Image (spheres, rainbow, N blue to C red):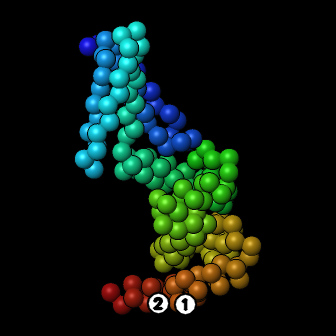
Amino acid sequence: MDVNANRSTVNPQNSQKKIEKYVLSDVSACTFTFSNGGESCVTSSPDQEIILMKLIPHTTKTKVFHEYVLRNYSACRNASELGIRCGYNSQKTFTRHFKKFFGETPYQWMLDKKMDEIRSLVLNSDITLKEIAELYGFKNLTHLVNTYTSRFGMPPIKSRMLTNKSHKAV
């Protein structure tokens, strides 16, 4: 039996799949046993070849997609840009895949990440709230304050003041 390995990787931006192909020569039959106990036999005539394709497990695809999103989300202003950067032409398809891997929509996930970064800036820097609002693309300061208060239960200025008081007390 001759085995010619032709390993090819599909661009992770497009389909998130890695495929390994093997061409089997001089093989008349091949039996596959599946994890559920089922079997399947593939036969061919001597002048034909059997091509085996191995798809990398779902966990690897998930890891590749996850890593690609983490590497690229910060350069995107919105979920549509992230979808395009990840190689999706359809926002609907991107959102479906994103929800499958992350458990929430790309919009909500990006908002959560952005708000965590903003909270870190509010608590650990002296950058003005207006500058933070501009830096993170909020329409205005009020929009930032309302979003921050909704997520963290208090306005950013109060969070900053409480943090500053606790640092002075130490």
**Mark 1 or 2: the one toward you:** 1
Give x and y (percent) for residue 66: 45, 53
Query: Which residue is pictured at 68% across the width and 51% down the height?
Result: 90
**Three-letter code for the amino acid on which mark 2 is drawn:** Leu
Q: Is residue 75 above or below residue 114?
A: above
- Residues at discs 1 and 2 in contact (Cβ within 8 Å): yes
Query: Which residue is pictured at 47% across the width and 49% down the height?
Result: 65
Q: Is residue 41 left or right of residue 143?
A: left
Question: Residue tagged by mark 2?
Answer: 162
Residue 29 visible here: yes
Question: Residue tagged by mark 1?
Answer: 154
Q: Quadrant of the C terminus?
A: bottom left
Q: Is residue 34 above or below residue 142?
A: above
Q: How crowded is mark 1: few (under 14 residues within 10 Å), some or many (20 or more)?
A: few
The residue lying toward the viewer, choosing from 71 and 136, is: 71
Residue 74 visible here: no
Secondary element under disc 1, as helix, strand or loop, is loop
The residue lying toward the viewer, choosing from 153 and 8, is: 8
Q: How crowded is mark 2: few (under 14 residues within 10 Å), some or many (20 or more)?
A: few
Q: Which residue lies furthest to the right in this view?
A: 139
The residue lying toward the viewer, choosing from 159 and 27, is: 27
Query: Which residue is pictured at 47% across the width and 40% down the height?
Result: 17
Q: Is residue 11 above or below residue 102?
A: above
Query: Which residue is pictured at 70% across the width and 80% down the height?
Result: 143
Give x and y (percent) for residue 107: 61, 66
Q: In this view, does 106 lie to the left or right of 44?
A: right
The image quadrant of residue 38 is: top left
**Three-letter code for the amino acid on which mark 1 is drawn:** Met
Which comes before the other along the chain, label 1 or label 2? Answer: 1
